[in-house]
Image (tube, helix red, strand yellow):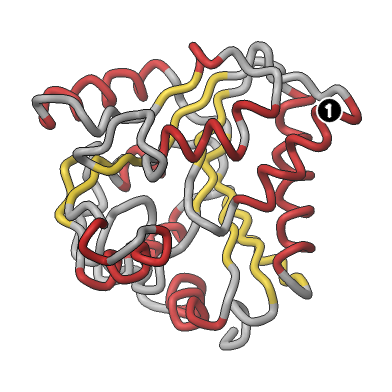
C-alpha cells in the first residue's frame, strides 16, 4: 500500500490524473474502473484537459463504474450516469457505448446485479478508482459488508445518506438504496487508486492504513491487495 500525501485537493487531483493518463497511454485498451462523488472530480477535470491539450485518446478504453442509485434514470441530474457524462465522458473522446454502470432504474434489481457481475467477469479493471466514505465504505459497501460480496442491492446507512444530501435539494430526496460493486469485484482489479480529501476522512484513512482488517471498516481490506496507491491531502492524512 503506497500512500502519497499532497498539500491540497488540487495537487491530489493532478497526481491522480497523471497516474490514470499513464495507464491509458501504456494500454490504449485499458478497462478503467471509475467512481463518483466529489473526490475524483478534480482528477476527471485534469484528464479531460489533458485529452484536449495533449491528445491522450480514450477511443478504445472501456469503463465500469462502482455504483448507481436505485430509482434514478440515467438522465436524472443526480444519477451517477449523468455525473460521469458531465464530469468526464462528454469531455474526452471515449465511445460512450464502452461505458458501463449498473442501471438504477432496472425493474428487477437482482437481475441487474447478475448482469453487472457477468459484465465484470469479461472486463477486469486495469485500475479501480475509489473514494472513501467517512465511515470507511468503498463504493456503497457499508460497514459489515462481507469481503466476498459481489454486485448487490444496498440499503444506505443514515451516515451515507447524510454525506450525500449536500448534492440534493433536501435529505428527503436522497435515494435510500443503491446498486454497488461488491468488495470482491473491487479487489479483482489489477491496481487500485484511491483519492481522499478532508479532515472528516482522517479517522477512516488511519483505520484503512494502520488498523485491523475488518468488515467493520470495509476499506481496510485494501491492505490485502498487492497494488494500491492512496493519494490524500494533508487533512485526510492528519492522523497517520
Say which element carries label 1: helix
Residue found at the far right of this picture: 54
Label 1 packing within 10 angstroms: few (<14), some (14-19), many (20+): some
Q: Quadrant of the N terminus?
A: bottom right
Q: Residue at x 34, y 41 (%)?
A: 67
- Residue 51 drawn at (x, y percent): 80, 28
Instruction: Residue 11: give x, y in percent of width and height.
Output: 79, 63
Is the residue 38 above or below the residue 122 in the image?
below
Where is residue 15? Give x, y as percent.
77, 54
Residue 158 location, quadrant: bottom left
Q: Residue furthest front?
A: 169
Quarter-of-image position of residue 143: bottom left
Q: With 10 as the anchor, is 161 left or right in this view?
A: left
- Quarter occupied by the C terminus: bottom right
Is residue 21 positioned above or below 148 on the image? above
Above/below status of 94 relative to 91: above
At 37% across and 51% down in the image, what residue appears? 139
**In the displayed structure image, the side of residue 197 where residue 152 appears, left or right:** left
- Quadrant of the rendered image containing residue 27: top right
Q: Residue at x 50, y 30 (%)?
A: 125
Q: Residue at x 48, y 44 (%)?
A: 35
Which residue is disc 1 drawn over? 52
Residue farthest to the bottom?
A: 239
Amino acid at each position: 500500500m503506497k500512500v502519497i500525501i499532497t498539500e491540497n485537493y488540487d495537487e491530489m487531483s493532478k497526481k491522480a490524473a497523471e497516474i490514470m493518463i499513464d495507464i491509458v497511454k501504456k494500454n490504449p485498451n485499458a478497462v478503467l474502473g471509475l467512481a463518483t462523488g466529489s473526490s475524483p472530480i478534480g482528477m476527471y477535470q485534469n484528464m479531460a484537459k489533458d485529452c484536449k491539450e495533449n491528445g491522450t485518446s480514450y477511443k478504445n478504453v472501456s469503463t465500469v463504474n462502482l455504483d448507481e442509485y436505485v430509482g434514478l434514470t440515467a438522465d436524472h441530474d443526480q444519477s451517477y450516469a449523468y455525473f460521469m457524462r458531465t464530469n468526464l465522458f462528454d469531455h474526452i473522446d471515449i465511445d460512450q457505448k464502452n461505458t458501463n454502470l449498473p442501471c438504477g432504474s432496472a425493474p428487477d434489481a437482482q437481475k441487474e446485479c447478475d448482469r453487472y457481475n457477468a459484465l465484470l467477469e469479461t472486463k477486469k479493471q486495469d485500475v479501480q478508482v475509489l473514494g472513501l466514505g467517512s465511515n470507511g465504505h468503498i463504493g456503497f459497501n457499508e460497514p459489515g459488508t462481507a469481503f466476498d460480496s459481489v454486485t448487490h442491492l444496498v440499503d444506505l446507512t443514515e451516515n451515507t445518506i447524510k454525506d450525500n444530501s449536500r448534492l440534493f435539494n433536501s435529505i428527503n430526496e436522497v435515494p435510500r438504496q443503491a446498486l454497488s460493486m461488491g468488495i470482491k469485484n473491487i479487489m479483482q482489479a489489477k491496481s487500485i487508486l484511491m483519492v481522499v480529501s478532508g479532515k472528516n476522512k482522517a479517522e477512516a484513512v488511519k483505520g484503512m492504513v494502520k488498523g485491523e482488517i475488518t468488515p467493520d471498516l470495509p476499506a481496510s481490506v485494501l491492505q490485502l491487495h498487492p497494488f494500491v496507491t492512496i493519494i490524500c491531502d494533508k487533512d485526510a492524512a492528519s492522523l497517520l
